[in-house]
Image (cartoon, rainbow, N blue to C red):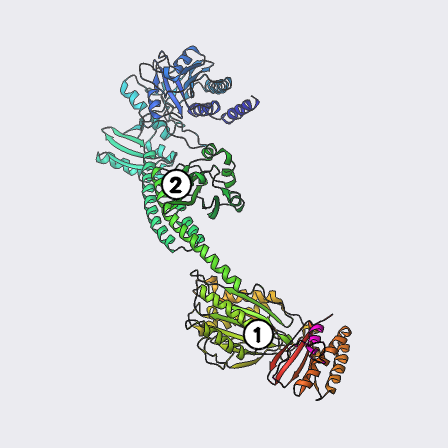
Amino acid sequence: MDAAATRLRVITTAGESLSGADLLSFALDHAVTESGGLGGMVHLRGPGSCGLLLTAAHGLLRTAVRNWAEIGEASGTAPARAAARGTPVWKPVETIEDHTGATLPAGGGLLAVPLIAPEGTLGALSVLMAPAEEPTPQQRAAVEALTAWAALRLGQLPADGQQVQSPRNREGPRPREEGARRPRSGPAIGRDGEPVRSAGPEGSSGTALTAPDSMTRALWQMSDAFFVVDGAWRVTFVNAEAERLLGVSHALLGRTLWDIFASLRVDLAAPGLETRCRQAVESGAPTTFEMRWPTNQRWYRMRLVPVPDGLTVYAADVTESQARAAERAAAERAAAERTARVTELTTALAQALTMRDVVAAIAAWVLPPFNASGLVIQIIEGRVIRVAGSVGYSRAFLDKIDGSAVTTISPVSEVYHTGKPAFIGSAEEYVARYPLMSGLPSAAGKAAWAFLPLIVSGRCIGCCVISFAESRRLNGEEQTLLTALSGLMAQAIERARLYDTEHTRAKELQRGLLPRALPSLRFVDTAARYLPASEGIDVGGDWYDVIPLSGARVALVVGDVMGHGLPEAATMGRLRTAVHTLADLEFPPAELLNRLNDLVNDLGENFYATCLYAVYDPVSATCTFACAGHPPPAIVRPGQPVQFSDCSPDPPLGAARPPFETCEIDLPEGSLLVLYTDGLVDAATGDIDDGMNDLARVLSSAVLSSGLQPSAGTAWRDGGRTGCGNESLARLCDDVLAGVLPDRQLTDDDAALLIARMHAVNPEDVAAWPLSDGPIAAGEAREHVRDQLARWDVDTLIMAAELLVSELVGNAVRHAKGPIGLRLLRGERLICEVSDSSLTTPRIRHASETDEGGRGLQLVAALSDRWGARYTSAGKCIWTEQQMP
């Protein structure tokens, strides 16, 4: 009760400045709202024996309002009884009928409360309620309080009259904009109950506006505005609607029409109105036109009819009819736009490949015509509902609905099981139909939905949910159109889902064939990028690799199997494995490609591949490589522009005839070696030479901007040199890809990029000696090792290193031929190398207990972490590695 009383105090305070018709309409609106009624009416006593005249109405059909426009005080209706008795009257609707046929819709009841002022009962305020049960005490109290307040306010008006509107519009009560004051109109009613005339400019009085004759009264009550001017353009008559149109705050009779127009600023809104009036009088012919009235901004159809002593003006409000015409035109335009968008949607869906493309096409061509704000594509996977794509929803909400069971009672499940669309026009309807999901509308921020089944080949694969931010009831045409569009969307979604599945599998296969991570090396920093083709689902055969070799050397390889598809990807995997195997055997680049060519020839006539295999030696700071049909590497030396190797490549593997040419280039400290596949340099222009020029330009700019361009000179890693690290190279790879392939443009070929930054070995970390022929060589080797390791402060390795070099040199003296050399290399590991001119490589023997020899290499294997042999240009080299302390 306290809340209701407070609300009534707020309402009455807000209406203190109102009077007349505005006051009655205000009181009626809030009486209906506070009592929960369906609508209401206000009747006032008319002049003479007119009975009760309808003055205001709210929420009622115009047919009912017409029937209740005037009721007799003895009619027995609820308003008549309340006005006669001076007490509230409640009456069910089915009994509300008199000889005039004044009826209201059945199923409710009418509560009428008299408007009692100090001078007597002015009329009655009535509220239509449903169901036809007596109102509660709270409802009665609200209506009676607002009625009493309005009656008291009416009784406090000045004695010269009370302005009350009595609408007679042929289309029923005219709606009022929210927050706007209702325009004042109608006759001034004096305390004697009779209308009084409006005062003229001099304050003289004339004939009353409601003369006893029926014609004057009909003109006064007609729904159109009507006024008359004489030959001097002075107003001689206005009816109630004209008084509202021209302004009741001024005396109208006797004033010139031009003076009234000037006060209303009519000339600014319709500059030609005065000219039209004068032309009508001069020509004597009626004229009709439409204009927007400046005071209320409504449209009127003005009809000027000349009469012998002046001009009569009719003004019919056509705002609603114009609005309906505008709505029809807008609907026709919308239909045409929707038809065009359907065509555009069909084209867009035909071009869409992935689910993301399909969602984007639906969002662009379906949501705008229907003023929708959200889209969710939900796919049924087994018994689970998955979100496949969305627009206009938060990630938190999508996570909430993703993975729900298809057996859950929900609109998506209903659509899935029935195969029929579901349209929900409000959040209240959603909650009523699905009470267990009452929190979803507020979580989604949506108020209306269209759930469309996605049916492909007679089976439902999911649901397309189109949502609206405001409550909305889709009409039959809109529902039919969305249902038809769901068929197009279903076909595109199914096609995109299959594409995405196959594409994902292909990419996973390809990623599995490429290196999971590049090795972290002391003398070579590396970073790589692989960019798959953006068109088609076939995988490519591009690959890259970084392979550590003996002697701190590093092998860099990049290749490309020609063609796309699973056979090409499988071939790429086989070649990559073969390169690893051949690299571990320490084959030089040309020999490795020779053996790789034999492998490709064995695969068949239709398999071809390009490959570039390079070996970097940090001791000599040189790189040796061989190329089979592959683009040449890009080289960035300190202080120099980007260059490409000028070595001519041999034909691709599978078409080449060995031997392969070997090239050697110098790569001083800090140099960059860039290996790539043809997909990077011919994707944009289609011409590999132009692509290489673009790569050089982009690479130069990216190196300069990244700060990786070293100055000429030597800076050693262990002498204060700061390496760029793999992270800087990774950013350089991204910059190069972004520059050569902007916006990841559509390509039909994969692209691989491998960038390596070279670091030369510090001369202080390398020691080499020639050894004498004969048995004394072992002693010399032990002495060199002992002295050098002492200088390097790694005494803990001296004993094992002495034994290793003694055994290796002894084998060289015994089984090979000179000259014999010894080299020590300090890095992450201690590397000992013994070289000779023999091409025979040693192997471990299984010596018996009685054998006096054959255990040397077993000792080498036991004392070292790794050991092996490789061929050199002068013979072979046996090497061992020990972990540095």
Residue 269 lies, with reference to residue 811, above or below; the image says above
- Mark 2 or mark 1: which is in front? 1
Residue 110 lies, with reference to residue 469, above or below; the image says above
Q: Give the amino acid at mark 1.
A: Ala
Quarter of the figure that contains the C terminus:
bottom right
Task: Name the spot of residue 656 as percent of width and height, x first.
Answer: 45, 78
Does residue 437 appear to the left or right of 551 in the view shown?
A: left
Principal SS element in the magenta part? loop
Task: Name the spot of residue 14 as percent of width and height, x first.
Answer: 51, 27
Q: Which one is in front, 786 or 343?
A: 786
Disc marking residue 170: none
Task: Name the spot of residue 29 as percent of width and height, x first.
Answer: 45, 25
Q: Which residues are magenta?
A: 839-863
Q: Which one is in front, 470 or 657?
A: 657
Q: Is residue 768 visible?
A: no
Q: Give the amino acid at mark 2.
A: Gly
Does residue 215 appear to the left or right of 485 in the view shown?
A: left
Residue 251 lies, with reference to residue 837, above or below; the image says above
SS under mark 2: loop
Pointer 2 with pointer 1, Cβ within 8 A: no
Disc marking residue 583: 1
Q: Is residue 321 visible?
A: yes
SS under mark 1: helix
Check disc 2 and report the residue beneath it.
419
